[in-house]
Image: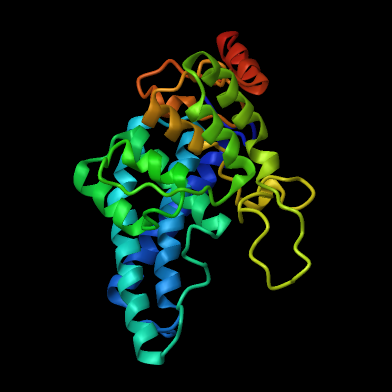
């Protein structure tokens, strides 16, 4: 059953296949071919981290078994570690402050959102301790953000927890849910999930050099700005909410079935928490009647 609100089976099959082919070819290229642009190489390799995460999210959206997702973590971690080594080498050789396109600090909403997703996936999928520690070392930012630090500390108790929240919108709502009395947490968690996507969009900065005002994936699937046929859409999943549920034992019953809540991550053996889409219901009926 397709979990995402958008995309039919052909869409998900096509783009998962393309991503997997691209990732395999890119890894082989990194291993065997000398780079033509050493300064860009750290960013090129980090893109493999993004691609690996994108594949996991595409698989989730398509309805793939949850237990198929963790296999992508080892390659993701290898690529991130290699990217860091290459970045250090290039920056040292050329006296550059950074050798990537991204701002790799949690104060950057893009990076914070991406790191939170990876931490949430790692918690929900219960990756091995060795992989978990490598991920936390790569995320870094210890003591920078009270919410992400507390989520990480649920599995790494020695984590130093920061005193401030780096991104009040939308994450203040999630922190409120975490700190609320148990009988209020379910409703407050639903409130966070309801506001998560719209509150990730920030007012346009007056300074054109200001940081990105919303995550890079925000418009993927928008028919007016980045339509589905462009193939970038991989779902819009509030993995941060799943991370908090896993970390703190919150009641997520009011979130089940929400278009942005990936509740199946916490229920790998089913049944699915997502309602069947109307087009899939019609397809099932046609097959039942021998017309599909």
Q: Does residue 137 lie above or below 151 as drawn?
A: below
Marker count (numbered): 0
Return the x and y of residue 174 as percentages of the image width and height.
54, 34
Color style of the picture: rainbow
Residue at 42% x, 29% y is: 265
Q: Does residue 68 lie above or below 284 as drawn?
A: below
**Which residue appears farthest toward the front when viewing the image?**
163
**Which residue appears farthest toward the top when viewing the image?**
289
Q: Does residue 41 lie above or below 252 as drawn?
A: below
Closest to the observer, 279 or 248: 248
Q: Does residue 242 lie above or below 12 as drawn?
A: above
Q: Quadrant of the C terminus?
A: top right
Instruction: Please give left or right for residue 137 compared with residue 161 in the image.
Output: left
Closest to the observer, 127 or 212: 212
Return the x and y of residue 29 as percentages of the image width and height.
35, 71
Instruction: Please give left or right for residue 3 compared with residue 126 in the image.
Output: right
Q: Quadrant of residue 4?
A: top right
Return the x and y of residue 145 as percentages of the image width and height.
46, 50
Instruction: Please give left or right for residue 134 compared with residue 277 in the image.
Output: left
Q: Is residue 208 visible?
A: yes
Return the x and y of residue 200 as percentages of the image width and height.
65, 46
Residue at 32% x, 36% y is: 154
Q: Is residue 68 visible?
A: no
**Which residue appears farthest toward the bottom when viewing the image?**
94
Q: Quadrant of residue 141?
A: bottom left
Residue at 56% x, 9% y is: 288
Residue at 45% x, 78% y is: 99
């Amino acid at each position: 059953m397709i979990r995402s609100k958008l995309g039919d089976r052909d869409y998900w099959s096509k783009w998962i296949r393309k991503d997997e082919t691209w990732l395999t070819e890119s890894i082989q290229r990194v291993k065997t071919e000398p780079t033509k642009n050493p300064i860009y190489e750290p960013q090129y390799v980090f893109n493999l981290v993004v691609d690996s995460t994108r594949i996991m999210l595409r698989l989730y959206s398509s309805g793939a078994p949850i237990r198929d997702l963790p296999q992508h973590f080892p390659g993701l971690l290898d690529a991130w570690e290699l990217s860091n080594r290459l970045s250090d080498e290039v920056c040292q050789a050329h006296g550059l402050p950074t050798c990537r396109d991204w701002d790799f600090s949690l104060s950057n909403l893009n990076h914070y959102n991406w790191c939170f997703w990876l931490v949430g996936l790692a918690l929900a999928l219960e990756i091995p301790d060795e992989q978990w520690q490598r991920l936390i070392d790569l995320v870094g930012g210890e003591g920078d953000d009270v919410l992400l630090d507390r989520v990480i500390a649920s599995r790494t108790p020695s984590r130093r927890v920061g005193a401030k929240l780096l991104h009040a919108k939308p994450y203040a709502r999630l922190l409120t849910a975490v700190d609320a009395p148990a009988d209020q947490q379910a409703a407050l968690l639903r409130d966070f999930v309801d506001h998560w996507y719209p509150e990730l969009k920030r007012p346009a900065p007056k300074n054109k050099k200001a940081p990105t005002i919303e995550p890079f994936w925000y418009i993927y699937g928008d028919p007016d700005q980045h339509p589905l046929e462009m193939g970038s859409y991989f779902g819009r999943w509030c993995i941060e909410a799943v991370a908090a549920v896993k970390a703190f034992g919150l009641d997520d019953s009011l979130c089940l079935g929400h278009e942005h809540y990936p509740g199946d991550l916490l229920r790998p053996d089913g049944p699915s928490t997502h309602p069947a889409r109307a087009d899939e219901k019609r397809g099932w009926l046609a097959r039942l009647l021998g017309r599909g």
